Image: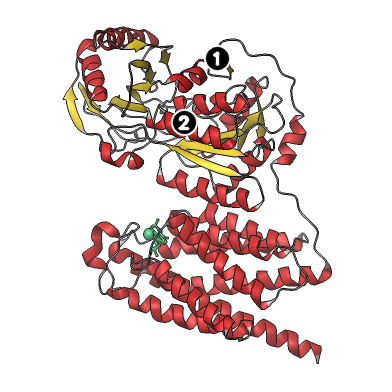
Amino acid sequence: MTRIFDEPATFADDALDGFTAANRRYVARVDGGVVRSTEMDEGQVALVIGGGSGHYPAFAGLVGQGLAAGSACGNMFASPAAGQVYRVARAANNGGGVLLSYGNYAGDVLHFDQAQLRLNAEGIETRTVVVTDDIASAPIDQLEKRRGIAGDLTVFKVAGAAAEAGLSLDEVERLAQKTNYRTRSLGVAFDGCTLPGAKEPLFTVEPGHMSLGLGIHGEPGISDHPMPTATELAELLVSTLLKDKPDDAGTRVVPIVNGLGTVKYDELFLLYGRIESLLTAEGLEIVEPECGELVTSLDMAGVSLTLLWLDEEIGTHWAAPADTPAFRKGNVAARAHRDVEQLAAAAEAPVEPPTAAAAALSSAAVTLLESVRAVVIEHEEELGRLDAVAGDGDHGIGMRRGVDAAAAAAAASAAADAGVDRVLVVAGEAWAEKAGGTSGALWGSGIIAVGHALGNRDAYTAAEAHAAAVAFQRAIVGLGKAEAGDKTMVDALLPYVEAYTSSHTGGASVTENLSNAAAAATTAADETAALSPRKGRARPLAEKSVGHADPGAISFALIAEAVARTYQELITTKENSHE
Ligand code: ADP
Ligand code: MG
């Protein structure tokens, strides 16, 4: 259990502040996480890692020379929001581009992808390598579905060393990908962990037993076993991992024995000794092993074994020096410290003040969002009922939380004299951060993309409005990867943009384009009733869903109609005021 805290709700942030205070030599605090406080070379690739808090030394403890340039730190066991990743990456960037790397969990993927879209749109070249080392989480022919656990360390270490050596973004990405492919882990748990302030553990393991392959947040394992001896445990871990070797594994291997929270170092060392003997007996050469706490899960009782199968270049980067709060190796050359205030300021996007005409457009954007809010509130219960048919019933409340936050953020931003781009970007960020759920991340990124597409101007042409609709579609499809017929909001969105495009190329006005597109979305949303879901939470209950429309498609169509109506009203008011 967690004994030391004031407010459970602010535990992660409070702990991160204290961590920074204790480690100023290595890190500086920025909004959303920490960045390295020591100077980097101009043009050096910035490795930005991150994930939920509660896994120390992952992730903030691995920021420093020779390793990560920054870490986005989410709440306890919760992905950082896209805005956090974005801000940390902006502060960490040194002109050489950004590599995002983190363990493969759905929430993290959504938020990091959204941050990547935004960074790229702003000209900060950004790539991603997701860590997938946990062999218990999917079979060997589905490597990309595996979760990331202690193998985070090998990928971060090799990518961080490559960045420190001045390699290009292409090369750092390639090495990170290869290291991920050559890293395999397997964990066992003896007991669960308890979140700060919680009365009950998040999950438990039957006393006297051990669960093989149990995830670091309690995701179900492969099998339960009576508690083995250390030798039996070593044999189980080694033999299972050796069956899951990558192609061209070679004979040089880095074993990493990782404690998950409450297993003592003496026990870890004992287990390591057994493991090393078994690997040596297989004719393998042991290279620079690690044994200790590297990726933990609060007070979870458990251990994992990671094997990194070296080749020459990975071996070089694994051996390179590093100096971070929790991981030190060799001797790094001392570097000067950066200006902490400047770093914090770099995290924020630069803001251009709008002209009077542009400010009038920001207030129109706020009016449009208010109308979206009104229609979501009007249909909140109906959307919840529709989502309860085969989903989890939260679509109405999720959309409501998102749009409430978005409308409030947009109004505040417009009042502070921001242009349309800024108003929509903060609205999208607020939507994604507050809504939760799949639709929250998708709507957030869609609105942010519209903000970027429109920019901060005095007026927009019909072609620019059309480009914004296309950007919305790209963001949603790019992030959610749903295809036509999967029974998602995309089944209303694709017909929307198609109708918009043909109306626009036919020379119609923006008002007509919006209303033609909305009509197409409404028809298409109703037609999703006939489909069977292939994406999202409704998939496992596919049969129940047939005969009912997709909630996300319906809410999209309702919003499209509201936007078309409100736009028409705005134009009419404007025309009248000119008379
Ligand atoms: P959650 O599914 O996380 O509970 P919501 O209930 O708010 O989120 O939203 C559900 C809607 O999200 C679905 O009806 C569907 O339209 C949409 N959705 C789910 N997955 C995807 C995806 N991959 N791409 C596009 N839309 C999706
Ligand atoms: Mg739902």
Q: Are marks 2 and 1 in contact (CB under 8 Å)?
A: no
Residue at (49, 30) in percent of width and height: 175
Q: Which residue is mark 1?
A: 328
Q: Amino acid at mark 1?
A: Arg
Looking at the rendered image, the quarter that the N terminus falls into is: top left
x and y percentages locating residue 380 in the rendered image? 44, 69
Q: Residue at x 75, y 60 (%)?
A: 418
Which numbered tag is attached to residue 54?
2
Q: Is the residue marked 2 within 8 Å of ligand 1, measured from its CB?
A: no
Q: Tell which circle, 2 or 1, labels the residue nearer the N-terminal end.
A: 2
Give the numbered dot on residue 457. Answer: none
Q: Left or right: 338 with respect to 114?
A: right
Residue at the spot 72% in from the left edge and 68% down from the top edge: 362
Residue 249 placed where, x, y %?
A: 33, 23
Mark 2 or 1: the one toward you: 1
- Give the amino acid at mark 2: Gly
Circle 2 sits in a helix, a strand or a loop, which is it?
A: loop
Q: Is residue 368 visible?
A: yes
Q: Residue furthest left?
A: 226
Disc 1: CA contacts within 10 A as few (<14), some (14-19) or many (>=20)? some
Q: Residue 97 occupies which quadrant of the picture?
A: top right
